[in-house]
Image (cartoon, helix red, strand yellow):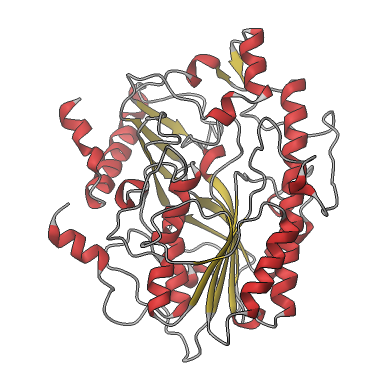
Protein backbone atom coordinates (compact mmCIF):
# COMPACT_ATOMS: atom_id res chain seq x y z
CA UNK A 1 0.00 0.00 0.00
CA UNK A 2 1.51 3.38 -0.94
CA UNK A 3 2.51 5.43 2.09
CA UNK A 4 0.54 8.46 0.97
CA UNK A 5 -2.61 6.35 0.63
CA UNK A 6 -2.18 4.79 4.07
CA UNK A 7 -1.66 8.20 5.65
CA UNK A 8 -4.75 9.58 3.97
CA UNK A 9 -6.75 6.56 5.12
CA UNK A 10 -5.73 6.71 8.75
CA UNK A 11 -5.64 10.42 9.56
CA UNK A 12 -8.86 12.16 10.61
CA UNK A 13 -10.35 14.44 8.00
CA UNK A 14 -10.12 18.17 8.52
CA UNK A 15 -13.19 20.35 8.74
CA UNK A 16 -16.69 19.70 10.07
CA UNK A 17 -18.62 16.44 9.64
CA UNK A 18 -21.27 16.16 6.96
CA UNK A 19 -23.97 17.53 9.30
CA UNK A 20 -23.00 19.96 12.03
CA UNK A 21 -23.95 18.67 15.48
CA UNK A 22 -24.80 20.76 18.51
CA UNK A 23 -22.44 21.04 21.46
CA UNK A 24 -24.07 18.15 23.34
CA UNK A 25 -22.45 14.87 22.42
CA UNK A 26 -24.90 12.20 21.33
CA UNK A 27 -25.06 8.49 21.99
CA UNK A 28 -25.12 5.56 19.56
CA UNK A 29 -26.42 2.01 19.96
CA UNK A 30 -25.66 -0.43 17.14
CA UNK A 31 -27.75 -3.61 17.30
CA UNK A 32 -26.23 -6.40 15.20
CA UNK A 33 -28.11 -9.60 14.41
CA UNK A 34 -26.18 -12.74 13.49
CA UNK A 35 -27.18 -14.46 10.22
CA UNK A 36 -30.52 -12.67 9.76
CA UNK A 37 -32.00 -12.06 6.33
CA UNK A 38 -35.08 -10.06 5.38
CA UNK A 39 -37.38 -12.16 7.56
CA UNK A 40 -39.03 -9.29 9.45
CA UNK A 41 -42.66 -8.26 9.44
CA UNK A 42 -41.73 -4.70 8.49
CA UNK A 43 -40.11 -6.10 5.32
CA UNK A 44 -43.27 -7.93 4.31
CA UNK A 45 -42.58 -11.42 5.66
CA UNK A 46 -46.01 -12.76 6.66
CA UNK A 47 -44.76 -15.82 8.56
CA UNK A 48 -42.22 -14.32 10.94
CA UNK A 49 -43.11 -12.71 14.29
CA UNK A 50 -41.06 -9.56 14.95
CA UNK A 51 -43.24 -6.98 16.76
CA UNK A 52 -40.35 -5.17 18.48
CA UNK A 53 -38.34 -4.67 15.31
CA UNK A 54 -41.49 -3.66 13.47
CA UNK A 55 -42.09 -1.03 16.16
CA UNK A 56 -38.51 0.22 15.83
CA UNK A 57 -39.05 0.51 12.07
CA UNK A 58 -42.19 2.59 12.66
CA UNK A 59 -40.20 5.02 14.81
CA UNK A 60 -37.44 5.66 12.28
CA UNK A 61 -36.34 4.95 8.73
CA UNK A 62 -36.54 1.54 7.11
CA UNK A 63 -33.99 1.14 4.32
CA UNK A 64 -35.30 -1.02 1.50
CA UNK A 65 -31.86 -1.50 -0.08
CA UNK A 66 -29.35 -2.13 2.72
CA UNK A 67 -26.36 -4.30 1.76
CA UNK A 68 -23.55 -5.95 3.66
CA UNK A 69 -20.34 -5.83 1.65
CA UNK A 70 -19.50 -9.42 2.63
CA UNK A 71 -21.61 -12.34 3.90
CA UNK A 72 -19.29 -13.64 6.62
CA UNK A 73 -19.54 -12.52 10.23
CA UNK A 74 -16.03 -11.42 11.32
CA UNK A 75 -15.33 -9.72 8.02
CA UNK A 76 -18.72 -7.99 7.98
CA UNK A 77 -18.39 -6.76 11.56
CA UNK A 78 -14.97 -5.31 10.80
CA UNK A 79 -16.49 -3.48 7.85
CA UNK A 80 -19.19 -2.04 10.14
CA UNK A 81 -16.64 -0.83 12.68
CA UNK A 82 -14.01 0.53 10.28
CA UNK A 83 -15.96 1.65 7.22
CA UNK A 84 -13.56 -0.36 5.05
CA UNK A 85 -14.25 -3.42 2.86
CA UNK A 86 -12.53 -6.64 3.88
CA UNK A 87 -9.61 -6.37 1.49
CA UNK A 88 -8.89 -2.86 2.77
CA UNK A 89 -9.23 -3.36 6.54
CA UNK A 90 -7.48 -6.75 6.58
CA UNK A 91 -10.16 -8.76 8.43
CA UNK A 92 -10.26 -11.26 5.58
CA UNK A 93 -12.01 -13.97 7.60
CA UNK A 94 -12.85 -15.22 11.07
CA UNK A 95 -11.07 -13.85 14.12
CA UNK A 96 -11.61 -16.81 16.46
CA UNK A 97 -9.75 -20.07 17.06
CA UNK A 98 -7.32 -21.35 14.43
CA UNK A 99 -8.61 -18.86 11.85
CA UNK A 100 -6.98 -16.01 13.81
CA UNK A 101 -7.44 -13.27 11.20
CA UNK A 102 -6.61 -9.72 12.34
CA UNK A 103 -7.63 -6.30 11.15
CA UNK A 104 -4.60 -4.26 10.08
CA UNK A 105 -3.23 -2.62 13.22
CA UNK A 106 -3.01 0.82 11.63
CA UNK A 107 -6.76 1.00 10.95
CA UNK A 108 -8.81 3.42 13.06
CA UNK A 109 -12.13 1.99 14.17
CA UNK A 110 -15.28 3.51 15.70
CA UNK A 111 -14.27 2.74 19.31
CA UNK A 112 -10.73 4.02 18.79
CA UNK A 113 -11.94 7.33 17.38
CA UNK A 114 -14.79 7.78 19.85
CA UNK A 115 -12.64 6.93 22.86
CA UNK A 116 -10.29 9.72 21.82
CA UNK A 117 -13.29 12.05 21.62
CA UNK A 118 -14.37 11.39 25.20
CA UNK A 119 -16.89 8.62 24.61
CA UNK A 120 -17.39 5.52 26.70
CA UNK A 121 -17.50 2.60 24.25
CA UNK A 122 -18.67 -0.88 25.07
CA UNK A 123 -19.69 -4.18 23.54
CA UNK A 124 -22.04 -6.77 24.94
CA UNK A 125 -22.57 -10.12 23.26
CA UNK A 126 -20.72 -10.98 20.07
CA UNK A 127 -17.86 -8.85 18.72
CA UNK A 128 -15.79 -11.35 16.69
CA UNK A 129 -13.00 -9.04 15.47
CA UNK A 130 -9.43 -8.41 16.56
CA UNK A 131 -6.95 -7.07 17.68
CA UNK A 132 -8.02 -5.15 20.77
CA UNK A 133 -5.56 -2.39 19.87
CA UNK A 134 -7.80 -1.60 16.89
CA UNK A 135 -11.06 -2.25 18.76
CA UNK A 136 -10.43 -0.89 22.29
CA UNK A 137 -13.88 -1.58 23.75
CA UNK A 138 -14.96 -1.81 27.34
CA UNK A 139 -16.08 -5.44 27.08
CA UNK A 140 -18.87 -7.02 29.12
CA UNK A 141 -19.11 -10.78 29.60
CA UNK A 142 -20.36 -12.34 26.36
CA UNK A 143 -23.89 -13.75 26.48
CA UNK A 144 -26.02 -15.59 23.94
CA UNK A 145 -29.13 -15.49 26.15
CA UNK A 146 -31.00 -12.28 25.29
CA UNK A 147 -32.22 -11.76 28.87
CA UNK A 148 -28.65 -11.79 30.18
CA UNK A 149 -27.56 -9.57 27.31
CA UNK A 150 -30.15 -6.94 28.27
CA UNK A 151 -28.89 -7.10 31.84
CA UNK A 152 -25.39 -6.34 30.57
CA UNK A 153 -26.71 -3.35 28.64
CA UNK A 154 -28.26 -2.08 31.87
CA UNK A 155 -24.95 -2.51 33.72
CA UNK A 156 -23.05 -0.67 30.96
CA UNK A 157 -25.43 2.28 31.09
CA UNK A 158 -25.22 2.42 34.90
CA UNK A 159 -21.45 2.75 34.68
CA UNK A 160 -21.22 5.52 32.11
CA UNK A 161 -21.03 8.35 34.70
CA UNK A 162 -22.68 10.89 32.43
CA UNK A 163 -20.31 10.22 29.52
CA UNK A 164 -21.68 10.01 25.97
CA UNK A 165 -21.51 6.44 24.81
CA UNK A 166 -21.31 4.07 21.89
CA UNK A 167 -22.73 0.64 22.70
CA UNK A 168 -22.29 -2.31 20.35
CA UNK A 169 -24.86 -5.05 21.01
CA UNK A 170 -23.99 -8.31 19.27
CA UNK A 171 -26.88 -10.77 19.34
CA UNK A 172 -26.17 -14.46 18.79
CA UNK A 173 -29.46 -15.12 17.04
CA UNK A 174 -30.41 -16.55 14.62
CA UNK A 175 -26.99 -18.16 14.08
CA UNK A 176 -26.94 -21.93 14.18
CA UNK A 177 -26.03 -23.83 17.33
CA UNK A 178 -24.63 -27.14 16.10
CA UNK A 179 -27.16 -28.46 13.60
CA UNK A 180 -30.05 -26.53 15.17
CA UNK A 181 -30.78 -22.97 16.26
CA UNK A 182 -30.49 -23.16 20.05
CA UNK A 183 -34.23 -23.24 20.54
CA UNK A 184 -34.10 -25.98 23.19
CA UNK A 185 -30.89 -24.91 24.88
CA UNK A 186 -29.80 -22.51 27.60
CA UNK A 187 -29.79 -19.75 24.99
CA UNK A 188 -33.59 -19.78 25.09
CA UNK A 189 -33.97 -19.89 28.88
CA UNK A 190 -36.38 -17.26 30.18
CA UNK A 191 -37.52 -16.27 26.68
CA UNK A 192 -41.09 -16.93 25.49
CA UNK A 193 -41.00 -19.59 22.78
CA UNK A 194 -42.60 -18.54 19.50
CA UNK A 195 -42.87 -21.68 17.42
CA UNK A 196 -43.76 -22.22 13.78
CA UNK A 197 -45.46 -25.07 11.97
CA UNK A 198 -43.05 -26.37 9.32
CA UNK A 199 -45.99 -27.09 7.04
CA UNK A 200 -47.14 -23.46 7.20
CA UNK A 201 -43.87 -21.56 6.66
CA UNK A 202 -43.01 -19.91 3.36
CA UNK A 203 -39.76 -21.32 1.99
CA UNK A 204 -37.73 -18.65 0.15
CA UNK A 205 -36.96 -19.23 -3.51
CA UNK A 206 -33.25 -19.83 -3.00
CA UNK A 207 -33.99 -22.97 -0.92
CA UNK A 208 -35.56 -26.30 -1.89
CA UNK A 209 -39.08 -26.81 -0.61
CA UNK A 210 -38.91 -30.14 1.21
CA UNK A 211 -39.36 -31.51 4.74
CA UNK A 212 -35.71 -30.93 5.72
CA UNK A 213 -35.81 -27.29 4.71
CA UNK A 214 -39.22 -26.64 6.24
CA UNK A 215 -38.13 -28.07 9.58
CA UNK A 216 -34.98 -25.96 9.59
CA UNK A 217 -36.73 -22.80 8.41
CA UNK A 218 -39.28 -23.15 11.23
CA UNK A 219 -36.39 -23.41 13.71
CA UNK A 220 -34.66 -20.43 12.14
CA UNK A 221 -37.82 -18.31 12.47
CA UNK A 222 -38.09 -19.28 16.13
CA UNK A 223 -34.57 -17.98 16.67
CA UNK A 224 -35.54 -14.79 14.78
CA UNK A 225 -38.46 -14.35 17.18
CA UNK A 226 -36.06 -14.76 20.12
CA UNK A 227 -33.81 -12.10 18.57
CA UNK A 228 -36.82 -9.80 18.31
CA UNK A 229 -37.62 -10.38 21.98
CA UNK A 230 -34.03 -9.47 22.84
CA UNK A 231 -34.21 -6.27 20.82
CA UNK A 232 -37.37 -5.37 22.72
CA UNK A 233 -35.62 -5.96 26.05
CA UNK A 234 -32.65 -3.77 25.06
CA UNK A 235 -34.90 -0.96 23.82
CA UNK A 236 -36.82 -1.10 27.10
CA UNK A 237 -33.55 -0.77 29.04
CA UNK A 238 -32.63 2.28 26.95
CA UNK A 239 -36.05 3.81 27.62
CA UNK A 240 -35.79 3.15 31.35
CA UNK A 241 -32.35 4.81 31.39
CA UNK A 242 -33.84 7.92 29.79
CA UNK A 243 -31.33 8.05 26.93
CA UNK A 244 -33.54 7.54 23.88
CA UNK A 245 -33.90 11.26 23.15
CA UNK A 246 -30.12 11.55 22.65
CA UNK A 247 -29.38 8.16 21.08
CA UNK A 248 -29.10 7.09 17.47
CA UNK A 249 -30.25 3.46 17.25
CA UNK A 250 -29.21 1.36 14.26
CA UNK A 251 -30.31 -2.22 13.68
CA UNK A 252 -28.90 -4.50 10.98
CA UNK A 253 -27.51 -7.97 10.37
CA UNK A 254 -23.97 -9.07 9.58
CA UNK A 255 -25.02 -11.41 6.74
CA UNK A 256 -27.94 -13.43 5.46
CA UNK A 257 -29.49 -16.68 6.71
CA UNK A 258 -27.21 -19.66 7.49
CA UNK A 259 -28.20 -21.69 4.44
CA UNK A 260 -26.53 -22.48 1.12
CA UNK A 261 -27.14 -19.68 -1.38
CA UNK A 262 -27.16 -16.97 1.26
CA UNK A 263 -24.43 -16.81 3.93
CA UNK A 264 -20.87 -16.75 2.48
CA UNK A 265 -22.12 -15.69 -0.97
CA UNK A 266 -22.50 -12.32 -2.67
CA UNK A 267 -25.94 -13.23 -3.95
CA UNK A 268 -28.77 -11.08 -2.61
CA UNK A 269 -29.99 -13.57 0.05
CA UNK A 270 -26.53 -13.27 1.63
CA UNK A 271 -26.05 -9.50 1.46
CA UNK A 272 -29.43 -7.73 0.98
CA UNK A 273 -30.35 -7.23 4.63
CA UNK A 274 -32.51 -5.24 7.06
CA UNK A 275 -31.39 -1.74 8.02
CA UNK A 276 -33.44 0.28 10.51
CA UNK A 277 -32.30 3.69 11.78
CA UNK A 278 -34.06 5.57 14.58
CA UNK A 279 -32.82 9.16 14.74
CA UNK A 280 -34.37 11.18 17.58
CA UNK A 281 -35.24 14.84 17.38
CA UNK A 282 -35.65 15.15 13.62
CA UNK A 283 -38.21 14.26 10.98
CA UNK A 284 -37.26 11.17 9.00
CA UNK A 285 -38.74 9.31 6.07
CA UNK A 286 -40.67 6.13 6.84
CA UNK A 287 -38.71 4.35 4.12
CA UNK A 288 -35.58 5.18 2.14
CA UNK A 289 -34.56 3.41 -1.05
CA UNK A 290 -30.94 4.58 -1.01
CA UNK A 291 -28.60 1.70 -1.75
CA UNK A 292 -26.78 1.76 1.57
CA UNK A 293 -23.62 -0.26 2.21
CA UNK A 294 -22.30 -1.44 5.56
CA UNK A 295 -19.23 0.67 4.71
CA UNK A 296 -21.59 3.64 5.33
CA UNK A 297 -22.24 2.71 8.96
CA UNK A 298 -18.97 3.97 10.48
CA UNK A 299 -19.22 7.36 8.71
CA UNK A 300 -22.82 7.63 9.93
CA UNK A 301 -21.89 6.92 13.56
CA UNK A 302 -19.00 9.38 13.47
CA UNK A 303 -21.16 12.02 11.81
CA UNK A 304 -23.82 11.70 14.52
CA UNK A 305 -21.14 11.94 17.22
CA UNK A 306 -19.56 14.98 15.58
CA UNK A 307 -16.21 13.19 15.23
CA UNK A 308 -14.27 13.62 11.96
CA UNK A 309 -13.97 10.39 9.98
CA UNK A 310 -10.63 9.18 8.61
CA UNK A 311 -9.90 10.35 5.10
CA UNK A 312 -10.21 7.79 2.36
CA UNK A 313 -13.23 5.88 3.62
CA UNK A 314 -15.24 4.61 0.63
CA UNK A 315 -18.59 5.07 2.44
CA UNK A 316 -20.47 8.16 3.56
CA UNK A 317 -22.91 9.19 6.26
CA UNK A 318 -26.52 8.09 5.93
CA UNK A 319 -27.82 10.95 8.07
CA UNK A 320 -28.57 13.28 5.13
CA UNK A 321 -30.79 10.69 3.42
CA UNK A 322 -32.90 9.80 6.49
CA UNK A 323 -35.32 12.54 5.45
CA UNK A 324 -35.60 11.36 1.84
CA UNK A 325 -37.54 8.45 0.45
CA UNK A 326 -35.75 8.46 -2.93
CA UNK A 327 -32.43 10.30 -2.68
CA UNK A 328 -30.33 10.71 -5.79
CA UNK A 329 -26.78 9.41 -6.10
CA UNK A 330 -27.28 6.25 -4.02
CA UNK A 331 -27.56 3.63 -6.75
CA UNK A 332 -24.60 1.26 -6.41
CA UNK A 333 -22.95 -0.96 -3.78
CA UNK A 334 -19.87 -3.20 -3.87
CA UNK A 335 -18.92 -6.55 -2.35
CA UNK A 336 -15.64 -8.09 -1.25
CA UNK A 337 -15.09 -11.63 0.08
CA UNK A 338 -11.97 -13.77 0.62
CA UNK A 339 -12.56 -16.35 3.37
CA UNK A 340 -15.14 -17.63 5.79
CA UNK A 341 -13.20 -20.21 7.75
CA UNK A 342 -9.46 -20.18 7.10
CA UNK A 343 -9.80 -23.31 4.94
CA UNK A 344 -12.41 -21.62 2.76
CA UNK A 345 -10.47 -19.47 0.31
CA UNK A 346 -12.68 -18.19 -2.49
CA UNK A 347 -12.09 -14.51 -3.33
CA UNK A 348 -14.99 -12.69 -4.98
CA UNK A 349 -15.82 -9.09 -5.85
CA UNK A 350 -19.16 -7.68 -6.90
CA UNK A 351 -20.91 -4.52 -8.00
CA UNK A 352 -24.69 -4.19 -7.75
CA UNK A 353 -26.87 -1.49 -9.24
CA UNK A 354 -30.65 -1.29 -9.10
CA UNK A 355 -30.95 -3.33 -12.28
CA UNK A 356 -27.87 -5.58 -12.50
CA UNK A 357 -25.29 -7.48 -10.48
CA UNK A 358 -21.79 -8.45 -11.59
CA UNK A 359 -19.67 -10.97 -9.65
CA UNK A 360 -16.09 -11.91 -10.47
CA UNK A 361 -14.84 -15.14 -8.92
CA UNK A 362 -11.13 -14.43 -8.77
CA UNK A 363 -10.11 -18.05 -8.17
CA UNK A 364 -12.91 -19.72 -10.10
CA UNK A 365 -10.68 -22.70 -10.90
CA UNK A 366 -11.13 -23.82 -7.28
CA UNK A 367 -14.20 -25.70 -6.08
CA UNK A 368 -16.58 -23.51 -4.09
CA UNK A 369 -15.97 -24.15 -0.36
CA UNK A 370 -18.83 -24.66 2.07
CA UNK A 371 -19.03 -23.21 5.59
CA UNK A 372 -18.97 -26.03 8.12
CA UNK A 373 -22.31 -25.08 9.68
CA UNK A 374 -24.01 -24.97 6.28
CA UNK A 375 -22.45 -28.24 5.16
CA UNK A 376 -23.64 -30.03 8.32
CA UNK A 377 -27.18 -28.68 8.11
CA UNK A 378 -30.02 -31.18 7.59
CA UNK A 379 -31.05 -29.24 4.49
CA UNK A 380 -27.71 -29.75 2.71
CA UNK A 381 -27.09 -33.25 4.07
CA UNK A 382 -30.49 -34.23 2.72
CA UNK A 383 -29.42 -33.05 -0.73
CA UNK A 384 -26.27 -35.17 -0.54
CA UNK A 385 -28.10 -38.19 0.86
CA UNK A 386 -30.75 -38.17 -1.86
CA UNK A 387 -28.41 -37.17 -4.65
CA UNK A 388 -30.60 -34.19 -5.58
CA UNK A 389 -29.63 -32.39 -8.76
CA UNK A 390 -31.32 -29.11 -7.88
CA UNK A 391 -31.21 -26.91 -4.81
CA UNK A 392 -34.00 -24.38 -4.98
CA UNK A 393 -33.92 -22.76 -8.41
CA UNK A 394 -30.27 -23.65 -9.14
CA UNK A 395 -28.55 -26.87 -10.17
CA UNK A 396 -26.53 -28.32 -7.29
CA UNK A 397 -23.48 -28.07 -9.58
CA UNK A 398 -23.58 -24.27 -9.21
CA UNK A 399 -22.96 -24.68 -5.49
CA UNK A 400 -19.68 -26.47 -6.12
CA UNK A 401 -18.32 -24.77 -9.25
CA UNK A 402 -18.74 -21.27 -10.63
CA UNK A 403 -17.52 -19.43 -13.72
CA UNK A 404 -15.08 -16.54 -13.59
CA UNK A 405 -17.79 -13.95 -14.23
CA UNK A 406 -21.48 -13.77 -13.38
CA UNK A 407 -23.94 -11.17 -14.63
CA UNK A 408 -27.60 -10.99 -13.65
CA UNK A 409 -30.43 -8.78 -14.85
CA UNK A 410 -32.21 -8.21 -11.52
CA UNK A 411 -35.25 -6.66 -13.18
CA UNK A 412 -36.21 -9.84 -15.02
CA UNK A 413 -34.28 -12.29 -12.84
CA UNK A 414 -34.35 -11.15 -9.18
CA UNK A 415 -33.29 -14.61 -7.97
CA UNK A 416 -29.98 -14.39 -9.89
CA UNK A 417 -30.39 -17.65 -11.80
CA UNK A 418 -29.62 -16.85 -15.45
CA UNK A 419 -25.95 -15.91 -15.88
CA UNK A 420 -25.75 -13.46 -18.79
CA UNK A 421 -21.97 -12.96 -18.77
CA UNK A 422 -21.58 -14.79 -22.08
CA UNK A 423 -24.70 -13.35 -23.72
CA UNK A 424 -23.80 -10.96 -26.60
CA UNK A 425 -26.95 -8.91 -26.01
CA UNK A 426 -25.67 -8.01 -22.52
CA UNK A 427 -22.05 -7.23 -23.45
CA UNK A 428 -22.51 -3.51 -22.81
CA UNK A 429 -23.79 -4.08 -19.26
CA UNK A 430 -21.01 -6.61 -18.63
CA UNK A 431 -18.28 -4.25 -19.77
CA UNK A 432 -19.70 -1.35 -17.78
CA UNK A 433 -19.94 -3.29 -14.51
CA UNK A 434 -16.62 -5.03 -15.08
CA UNK A 435 -15.01 -1.61 -15.48
CA UNK A 436 -16.74 -0.19 -12.38
CA UNK A 437 -15.76 -3.16 -10.27
CA UNK A 438 -12.10 -2.91 -11.20
CA UNK A 439 -12.09 0.86 -10.69
CA UNK A 440 -13.45 0.31 -7.17
CA UNK A 441 -10.78 -2.29 -6.49
CA UNK A 442 -8.11 0.17 -7.60
CA UNK A 443 -9.60 3.00 -5.52
CA UNK A 444 -9.61 0.77 -2.42
CA UNK A 445 -6.10 -0.60 -3.07
CA UNK A 446 -7.28 -4.20 -3.40
CA UNK A 447 -4.35 -6.67 -3.10
CA UNK A 448 -6.30 -9.11 -5.26
CA UNK A 449 -5.80 -6.89 -8.29
CA UNK A 450 -2.82 -9.13 -8.95
CA UNK A 451 -5.29 -11.79 -10.17
CA UNK A 452 -5.93 -9.76 -13.32
CA UNK A 453 -2.25 -9.91 -14.25
CA UNK A 454 -1.00 -13.26 -13.05
CA UNK A 455 -3.98 -15.59 -13.50
Q: Residue at x 84, y 38 (%)?
A: 196
326, 132: nearer the viewer: 132
Residue 45 seen in render:
no
Q: Position of residue 107 (x, y in %)?
A: 31, 60
420, 225: nearer the viewer: 225
Q: Position of residue 6 (x, y in %)?
A: 20, 60
Q: Is residue 55 left or right of residue 289?
A: right
Q: Position of residue 274 (x, y in %)?
A: 60, 52
Residue 227 seen in render:
yes
Q: Is residue 257 left or right of residue 314?
A: right
329, 452: nearer the viewer: 452
| In the depicted structure, whether residue 441 falls above or below residue 55 | above
Q: Residue at x 44, y 42 (%)?
A: 94
Q: Position of residue 375 (x, y in %)?
A: 57, 24
| In the depicted structure, whether residue 77 falls above or below residue 288 | above
Query: Where on the picture, by quarter, is residue 83?
Result: bottom left
The residue sitting at the bottom extreme is 23
Query: Where on the picture, by quarter, is residue 220?
Result: top right
Marks counted in the figure total 0
Q: Residue at x 54, y 28 (%)?
A: 372
The residue sitting at the left extreme is 3
Quadrant occupied by the C terminus:
top left
Q: Is residue 261 left or right of residue 238?
A: left
The residue sitting at the top extreme is 387
400, 122: nearer the viewer: 122
Amino acid sequence: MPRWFLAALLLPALGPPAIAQDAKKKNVVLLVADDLGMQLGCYGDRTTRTPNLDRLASQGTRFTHGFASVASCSASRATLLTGLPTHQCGQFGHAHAEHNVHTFRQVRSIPLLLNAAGYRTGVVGKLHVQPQAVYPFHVETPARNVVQLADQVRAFLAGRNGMPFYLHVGFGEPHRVGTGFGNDAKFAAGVPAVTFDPAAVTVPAFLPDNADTRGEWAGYLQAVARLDHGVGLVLRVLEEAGVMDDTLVIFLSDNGPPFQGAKTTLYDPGVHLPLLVRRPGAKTAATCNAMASWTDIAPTVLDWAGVPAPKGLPGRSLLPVLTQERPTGWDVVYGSHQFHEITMYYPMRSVRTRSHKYIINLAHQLPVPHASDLWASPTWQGVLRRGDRRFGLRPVEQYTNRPREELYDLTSDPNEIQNLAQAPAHAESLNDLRRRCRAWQEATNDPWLVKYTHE
